[in-house]
Amino acid sequence: MKLAIIEGDGIGREVIPAAVKVLDAFGLEFEFEKVPLELGYTRWEKTGTAMSSDDLETIKGCDAVLFGAVTTVPDPSYKSVLLTIRKELDLYANIRPVKPLPGITGVTGRNDFDFIIVRENAEGLYSGIEEIGSELSWTKRIITRKGSERIAEYACKLAKRRKNRLTIVHKSNVLKSDKLFLDICRQTAAAHGVEYEDTLVDSMAYSLMMHPERYDVVVTTNLFGDILSDMCAALVGSLGLVPSANIGDKYAFFEPVHGSAPDIAGKCVADPLAAILCVKMLLEWMKEARFRIIDEAIAHVLQQKIITPDLGGAASTMEVGNAVAEYVRRNL
Ligand code: ATP
Ligand code: MG
């Protein structure tokens, strides 16, 4: 197992080292090779490239990636490092678990929900097929049978390991292209024996805030998933607490939902819990049975109030990382 570690920019350079401490606490060194790579804005400032084709080959030689965040490079010809990696590794499923942490409540004040958003990550409105003009601009929205089938399969398999419930989110009353997505999701759920319902995206946005406890696995197209999953970070409480995974048939890529947060970078105050939860998702993807101890360890540090300023504490990023790692080491 080879893991590329890309800290990137800003607080990525703080939260990833803290998360790596937790990963190291599992003592996987013998079967495990870490491949550090410097990519992003910092790299671009030094060398004029944010990511070279050699870097991409190195990444393709790994099995998975742990990624911090990259700041967008101010160069009109710049191609996003993230989008390039997503495309090259064919990471078609974007997974966002939305689950409260003990003692922390988000905007709604509730903590009775536990669901996962499965977002199609390769097509939809992010097709990149567009034309920009001063009188007319357009972007093509691509929904394919193959793309819909593989995301529906992923979501159904996930639902079967959970409460066996799938919510298909779409806007097929207005966007007729969504009818294909909806039909395929329905057929796939029926074939897997998964209980399913479908909801229009606008009413889903409302329902997620009013009744988040109703959902188990939510599957949707690219743009809707992008918007709904950031909105759901507010249910959990903070951007600093939400991890995500981008998964394909061969590779997996784990990144916290937050960005490089230049406003707090370099101050050692960034909350590393999202990055640490990315390590949990990585271990689960690797089928490392002990991944659940990370939840216990996080509950422990929250209870001990070893928390960063975003949660009202005074601990540094690395103090939180060390405390979680220490708990894992003692209780494995
Ligand atoms: P980028 O352009 O890289 O996305 P950004 O300015 O959009 O950066 P984000 O990282 O998306 O910043 O975060 C938005 C705000 O949320 C930041 O201003 C920051 O204060 C806060 N934030 C994000 N991540 C964390 C974290 N891990 N810990 C504490 N606060 C955070
Ligand atoms: Mg941002």
Image: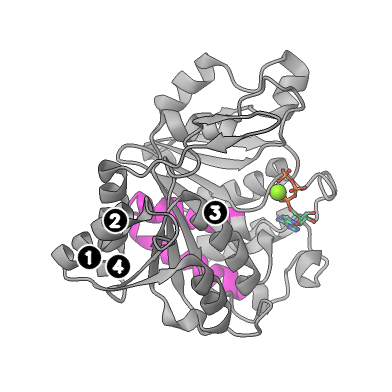
The residue nearer to you, when weighing 272 against 41, is 41
Looking at marks 4 and 2 on the same chain, the residue that comes earlier in the sequence is marked by 2
Any mark on residue 226, and which? 3
Looking at marks 1 and 3 on the same chain, the residue that comes earlier in the sequence is marked by 1
Along the horizontal axis of the image, is 252 left or right of 263? left
Q: Distance from label 1 to label 3 (Cα)?
A: 22 Å
Q: Which residue is mark 4?
A: 159
Q: For the residue marked with disc 1, what is the amino acid?
A: Ala
User: Residue shown at 69%/66% (left/top)?
Assistant: 238
Instruction: Classify mark 2: helix, strand or loop.
Output: helix
User: Residue shown at 58%/74% (left/top)?
Assistant: 101
Looking at marks 1 and 4 on the same chain, the residue that comes earlier in the sequence is marked by 4
Q: Position of residue 329 (x, y in %)?
A: 52, 60
Q: Position of residue 18 (x, y in %)?
A: 65, 50
Looking at marks 4 and 3 on the same chain, the residue that comes earlier in the sequence is marked by 4
Q: For the residue marked with disc 2, what is the amino acid?
A: Ala
Any mark on residue 189, and which? 1
Instruction: Classify mark 3: helix, strand or loop.
Output: helix
Q: Which residue is mark 2?
A: 152
Residue 176 lies in quadrant: bottom left
Q: Are marks 1 and 2 in contact (CB under 8 Å)?
A: yes
Figure quadrant of the C terminus = bottom left
Along the horizontal axis of the image, is 261 left or right of 274? right
Looking at marks 1 and 2 on the same chain, the residue that comes earlier in the sequence is marked by 2
Relative to residue 106, is residue 132 depicted above or below?
above
Q: Are marks 1 and 4 in contact (CB under 8 Å)?
A: yes
Q: Position of residue 256 (x, y in %)?
A: 59, 52
Question: Which region is colored magenta?
Answer: 275-301
User: Given this view, does label 4 or label 3 mark the residue nearer the observer?
Assistant: 3
Q: Position of residue 185 (x, y in %)?
A: 27, 59
